[in-house]
Amino acid sequence: MTPYDGYENGTYIEDELTIEGCNPPSSGRWNVNGLEVCRNREIEFNEFIYVDSGDTLILDNVTLISSYTTSTSGTVIRVQNGGRLETDNETVIKSSGTQIPYLRVYTGSSADIKNTTMLPSSPGRFRFYMSTGATANVTDSSLGYVSYFYGTSKTAITNSYVNSPYISVSYT
């Protein structure tokens, strides 16, 4: 059963189904396990989020705040080879820490970013890193001061706002 409309005991259910399973740790690295659906909440975390092969993280009307300050890379979310990230419904991804936040989508993984705002650290940027062979669709979103798209051969940005005086696109 998916987190959306479906059948139960032969009867079609039009309402959105509820799936529990949003399990961010109180501290440390958040390793997404299987399908995790987070809805209508604020989540603050102090290390990375890893979405590994076969795992999916869905953020629906979530404010995700990274307070990570000890890394020079400042990674917020890493979608590893074979992982999937989906955001929608006024989701906000931001950093309250001192490091530049990243969204990294690696080869063989995917991200579907809809109705989402990505805010930079202050002062700073929000880096969106795409490995060659990864797929991302950004729709109806605001990417705050994005400065880098790396290897973005499969990235589509539709009806979205990119707040940046420049965008660097490089292929490897």
Image: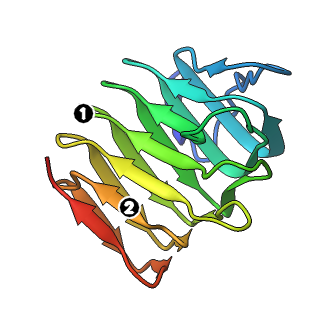
Q: Is residue 24 visible?
A: yes
Query: Residue 49 or 59: which is nearer the viewer?
Result: 49
Vertical order, 83 against 118 (above or below): above
Mark toward the viewer: 1 or 2: 2
Q: Is residue 147 left or right of residue 63?
A: left
Where residue 54 appears, as percent x and y from the top left, is: 38, 18
Residue 30 numbered tag: none
Q: Residue at x 53, y 42 (%)?
A: 5
Q: Quadrant of residue 39?
A: top right
Which dot marks residue 107?
Answer: 1
The dot on residue 148 is 2
User: Which of 135 and 48 lies nearest the eye of the viewer?
Assistant: 48
Relative to 17, say whether 65 is above or below. below
| Secondary structure at numbered mark 1 | loop
What amino acid type should be assigned to the residue bearing mark 1?
Answer: Thr
Residue at figure coordinates x 24%, y 33% from the top left:
107
First-in-chain label (1 vs 2): 1
1 and 2 marks in contact (CB < 8 Å) = no
Residue 67 screen position, x and y as percent = 79, 41
Identify the residue at image location x=18%, y=43%.
Answer: 132
Q: Residue at x 72, y 27 (%)?
A: 22
Mark 2: secondary structure: strand
Badge 2, how many Cα within 10 Å: few under 14, some, many 20+?
A: many
Q: Can the viewer see residue 15?
A: no
* Rendering coords of residue 128 (x, y %): 43, 54
Q: Amino acid at mark 2?
A: Tyr
Percent across and percent down for residue 14 are 59, 47
Q: In the image, 106: left or right of 133?
A: right
Look at the picture and state if 146 lies above or below 152.
below
State the separation of the CA atoms marked 1 and 2.
17 Å
